[in-house]
Image: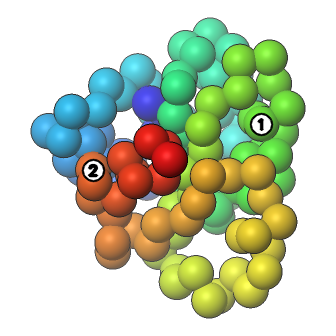
Amino acid sequence: MLIVDDHSGFRTFVRRLLESGGFRVVGEAAGAVEARSAVPVLLPEVVLLDVNLPDGDGLQLADELADGAHAPAVVLISSHERSDFGDRLERTSARGFISKADLTPAAVADLVDS
């Protein structure tokens, strides 16, 4: 798994949370540019991707990653609720969306194992 979020403290928290739930985290990225560089090198099976990044749109990045040669499953996250994005979430190639308040290893597993 690759964790993409611009807040380092949140990335650290999520790494610990997901690793304790059995996920293998292969890397972290602070933004879209770092994620684009990391995915072809690390080849993560899953990318946990913040919708709001300082250097790019997470929804657009989800679609870009889905078009790659080794397309990972993308799970979108945000501190905002699903309703704040309207139907934009439904139009992405991401496996799904989890608000950061509801983020658990089980919630991620439900989306990537389906």
Give the CA distance from mark 1 to mark 2: 22 Å
Q: Residue at x 43, y 25 (%)?
A: 27
Task: Work out whether residue 65 or residue 28 is closer to the camera in this orientation and state it.
Answer: 65
Task: Work out whether residue 109 or residue 68 is closer to the camera in this orientation and state it.
Answer: 109
Q: Is residue 43 left or right of residue 67?
A: left
Query: Which x, y percent locates residue 90?
Result: 75, 70
Q: Amino acid at mark 1?
A: Ala
Residue 30 visible from this viewpoint: no
| Local secondary structure at mark 1 | helix
Q: Residue at x 35, y 59 (%)?
A: 107
Q: Is residue 57 left or right of residue 16?
A: right
Q: Amino acid at mark 2?
A: Pro
Mark sitting on residue 66: 1
Above or below 16: residue 87? below
Query: Which x, y percent locates residue 113?
Result: 45, 42
Q: Quadrant of residue 83?
A: bottom right
Above or below 39: residue 41? above
Mark sitting on residue 105: 2
Q: Residue at x 71, y 18 (%)?
A: 70
* Circle 2 crowding by C-alpha within 10 Å: few under 14, some 14–19, many from 20: some
Query: Which x, y percent locates residue 56?
Result: 77, 53
Mark sitting on residue 14: none
Considering every residue shown, the one lying at the far left of the view is: 20
Above or below 38: residue 111? below
Position of the N terminus, as image quadrant, is top left
Q: Is residue 88 left or right of residue 21?
A: right
| Local secondary structure at mark 2 | helix
Of mark 1 and mark 2, the one earlier in the sequence is 1
* Circle 1 crowding by C-alpha within 10 Å: few under 14, some 14–19, many from 20: some
